[in-house]
Image (tube, rainbow, N blue to C red):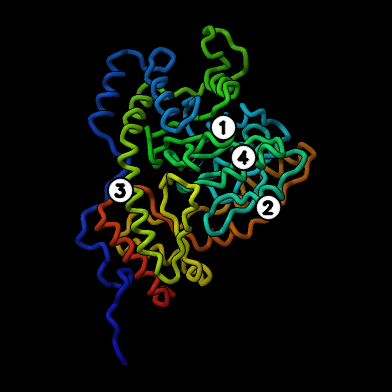
Amino acid sequence: MTVTTPSLAVHGGRAELDGLPDFPTWPQSGAEEERGILDVLHSGKWGSTHGDVVATFEQEFAQAQQARHAIALSNGTLALAAALRAAGVGVGDEVIVPPYTFIATAAAPLFVGAVPVFADVDASTHLLDPAATEAAITERTKAVMPVHLAGNVADMTAFAELGRRHGIAVIEDSAQAVGAQWGGRGVGTLGDLGTFSFQTSKNMSAGEGGIVTTDDDELAGAVYSLVNVGRVPGGGWYQHAAVGYNLRLTEFQGAILRAQLARLPEQQAVRETNARALQEQLAGVEGVAVAPLDPCVTAHGRHLFIFRVPELGDAGLRDAAARALAAEGVPGVSTGYVPLHRNAALVAETRALAQRLGQPVPEAACPRADQVSRDTLWLPQHVLLGSAEQVAAVGRAIAKVARSAHELA
Ligand SMILES: *Cc1c(COP(=O)(O)O)cnc(C)c1O
């Protein structure tokens, strides 16, 4: 009998990333953030009602994303709710959302009294499927919210066309896709409205924060009003033409975000180079699947590096693979989302709302979301900010774990 040397680090072998420096941490900042925060502090204008830092950031962000308008607000979750309300979505309306996303996408319709309806994702990309969306449309459907998951872009040609044909609003949840483009156009400008998040983990961050983009003057005014207690752009302080929240960002956050936006292109270039190298490295690895890039995705947001391990998933070994990867020294390995049609709180609240409204409780049949939730692994964006040497070692670690699947059982 031959004795094999242990290969996996989780079984005592040498960790693939042994001897390499630590990965970059996130968030990152420099002299620009420091100067910006101090300038706001000393100016005495800490709120955006008195200073112009948030307003300047809004203009810079709109330009970067090729949008006519951008309205900053407190976070990406409320950005979705504000976008829905601006689009006229309210009590009793149905909003189609993917089940494979962060919970905010499906919670936002409930905030405005609307019923979230799940349509399945494409298994290879994890993105909302236009055909499944079409099949979920009823006479109550008022909006669809494709999510640009991981920085990849949902099929916006199909969703824009579907929105026009059915007369429903298209709201792009672009929380993970700052900098991404579809056919050369920035995400958040392809539907009626787009929303972004500046929460700590996102590719641009102020700890918290968000922004809504649109090319439509009227929708922009409606979002502004919701963010600013019903005020009118350019109107008086006590002129409340609508009932709105206060969702404003502080000037301190605006200052940080201006610096983060300026740094983004350079960081995106590093993430892109590393993601492509990693994808190439994994192309020949059996048992590992990375979605091919749609040629319409002319810029990828690179928020997550997502891959599937279908055989390990079928064998119930995906979580063991995640632990094995972490033992190899790969930072931030995640087993991804529990699909939202399986979230008890969302299901209960949706059922209660539909029953109260006397409407049918939507049935969620999303076998592909169930499948990918069993076999998906991802790495956070800051891993893609590592050196070429570090990223190559990550690729070797993934290949090693996939090859040694039998050892995980
Ligand atoms: C982060 C995120 C949100 C919510 O943004 P917050 O700023 O954390 O409220 C919404 N949708 C998706 C897809 C996200 O990743």
**Residue 193, disc:** 1
Q: In the rendered view of the protein, which quadrant contains the N terminus?
A: bottom left
Mark 4 or 1: in front is 4
Given the image, on which type of amino acid does mark 2 rest?
Ala
Give the mark, 4 or 3, whose residue is nearer the N terminus. Answer: 4
Residue at disc 3, secondary structure = helix
Quick one: which residue is furthest to the bottom in this view? Answer: 1
Residue 226 in view: no
Neighbourhood count class around disc 1 (C-alpha, 10 Å): few under 14, some 14–19, many 20 upward: many
Taking the image as shown, residue 116 lies to the left or right of residue 263, namely: right
Write the residue at 41% across / 53% down. 305
Residue bearing the label numbered 4: 160
Give the mark, 4 or 1, whose residue is nearer the N terminus. Answer: 4
Given the image, on which type of amino acid does mark 3 rest?
Leu
**Residue 364, disc:** 2
Give the mark, 1 or 2, whose residue is nearer the N terminus. Answer: 1
Give the mark, 1 or 3, whose residue is nearer the N terminus. Answer: 1
Give 401 or 166, whichever is nearer the viewer: 166
Contact between marks 4 and 1 (CB within 8 A): the answer is: no
Give the mark, 2 or 4, whose residue is nearer the N terminus. Answer: 4
Given the image, on which type of amino acid does mark 4 rest?
Ala
Residue bearing the label numbered 3: 385
Instruction: Indicate if the residue with disc 4 has its beta carbon within 8 Å of ligand 1.
Output: no
Q: In the rendered view of the protein, which quadrant contains the C terminus?
A: bottom left
Residue at disc 1, secondary structure = strand
Given the image, on which type of amino acid does mark 1 rest?
Leu
